[in-house]
Image: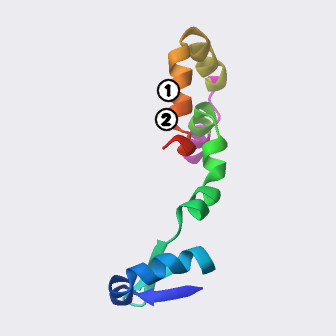
Amino acid sequence: MNAIPVYEAKNRLSYYLHLTDEQGPVFITNHGKVSYVIQNLKDYQNANRELTKKSFSERIQNSRVNYGLENDDFNYSEYYESIREEHPMIRDFEETMFNEDKL
C-alpha cells in the first residue's frame, strides 16, 4: 500500500498519478489518517462495476432494506416494469443515467 501525506501528494501529484497505473491506488494521509485515494479510472470502474449492473428497481429495493422498509407488501419491481413498458423513454433514460460506460 502506497500511503503518502497530503503535502507530498501536492508536490508530486504527476508522479503519483503515473504510479497508480503501475502499482494501484495511492492513499493520502491527513494528520496521520488515510483520508483520500488516488486511483486510475479503469480500476475505479472495475471496483464499482457491481453497482452499475443493478437495475433502478433493484437499487430502490436495496435502499428500502437499508432503511428497514423491506417488509411492506408493495411490489416495486412489477410497478417499475409496468412503467417501463408504457414509457420506453424512461427505460432509455434509466440505461443512460446509470451506465457509467457512457459517461
C-alpha span from label 2 to label 1: 6 Å
Which residue: 61% across, 48% down?
Answer: 51
Asked if residue 5 is among those painted magenta in the image, a careful observer would answer no
What residue did someone put label 1 on? 93
**Are there few (<14), some (14-19), or many (20+) residues within 10 Å of tag 2?**
few
The image quarter in which residue 22 lies:
bottom right
Location of residue 26 in the rendering, given as x and y in whole percent from the top left corner? 52, 79
Contact? badges 2 and 1 (CB < 8 Å): yes
Colour scheme in use = rainbow
Pick the front one: 35 or 74: 35
In the picture shown, does residue 87 fall above or below 43?
above
Secondary structure state at the residue bearing disc 2:
helix
- Residue type for callout 1: Phe
In the picture shown, does residue 42 fall above or below 70?
below
Would residue 31 be seen by someone viewing this image from the given angle? yes
Pick the front one: 17 or 63: 17
Would residue 73 be seen by someone viewing this image from the given angle? no
Which residue: 53% across, 61% down?
Answer: 41
Q: What stretch is highlighted in magenta?
A: 62-75
Location of residue 97 in the rendering, given as x and y in whole percent from the top left corner? 49, 35
